[in-house]
Image: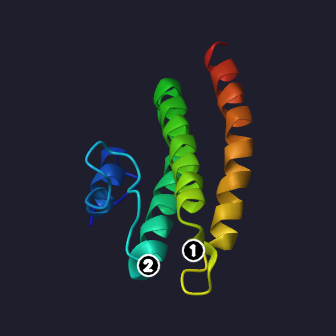
Amino acid sequence: MPVLHERPASVTWAFASLAAELAEDGTTAEKVEKDHASTYLIGKLNRARLRTKMRGLPADDNIEEHKLALKEYEEILQYGDRNPEVVDADVNMSMELKLCAEMVGLLPTKLARLAKRRSR
């Protein structure tokens, strides 16, 4: 496995297996088998987290990664809305969905701050 801090492209490579679970147009799958739902959603959640933690990117790339993270968090919430069973004891993703809702509320402010810093 590549060292993730060497270049952002390695992040994309590290999550290539997750892409196999995505719908053909790159969006979140409508439904994943219940046995795999937790793994699938945690993978998407981790990818969104990584997008906001990459350091040393040019300002435009950093903003783009944050936008993609916001989109990912929104897709996770939409998946939870379409599949309410993800909060059941079997899958137990209620805390993760709360985290996603919080990030959807916070990231627009951070994006505005990043954009303002870029324009200086």
Element carrying mark 2: helix
Please give the label number shown on residue 34: 2
Q: How crowded is mark 2: few (under 14 residues within 10 Å), some or many (20 or more)?
A: some
Q: Disc 1 or 2, which lies upstream in sequence?
A: 2
Q: Which residue, as the protein is rendered here, is positioned at the far bottom?
A: 90
Q: Please, what is the three-letter code of the amino acid marked with disc 2? A: Lys
Q: In which quarter of the image is the C terminus?
A: top right
> Is residue 51 shown to the viewer in this render?
yes
Left or right: where does residue 61 sit relative to residue 15?
right
**Side (left or right) of 9 relative to 49:** left
Identify residue type, mark 1.
Glu
Q: Quadrant of residue 81?
A: bottom right
**Residue 21 sits in which quadrant?**
bottom left
Q: In the image, residue 84 lies at what x, y percent? A: 59, 68
Q: How is the image coloured?
A: rainbow
Do callouts 1 and 2 mark residues in contact (Cβ within 8 Å)?
A: yes
Looking at the image, is 80 positioned above or below residue 118? below
- Residue in the picture at 61% in, 19% down: 118
Looking at the rendered structure, the secondary structure element under dot 1 is: helix
Label 1 and label 2: CA atoms lie apart by 8 Å
Above or below residue 6? Residue 114 is: above
Task: Residue 14: name its quadrant.
Answer: bottom left
Q: Residue at x 69, y 60 (%)?
A: 99
Q: Can residue 54 be seen in this view?
A: no
Q: Residue 45 location in percent, x, y?
A: 52, 60
Using the image as rendered, state which of residue 67 and residue 118 is in the foreground: 67
Residue drawn 27% across and 54% down? 13
Q: For residue 85, which numbered disc appears in the image? A: 1
Q: Which of 20 and 35 is in front in this view?
A: 35
User: Can you say whether 80 is above or below 55 in the image?
Assistant: below
State which quarter of the image contains the N terminus: bottom left
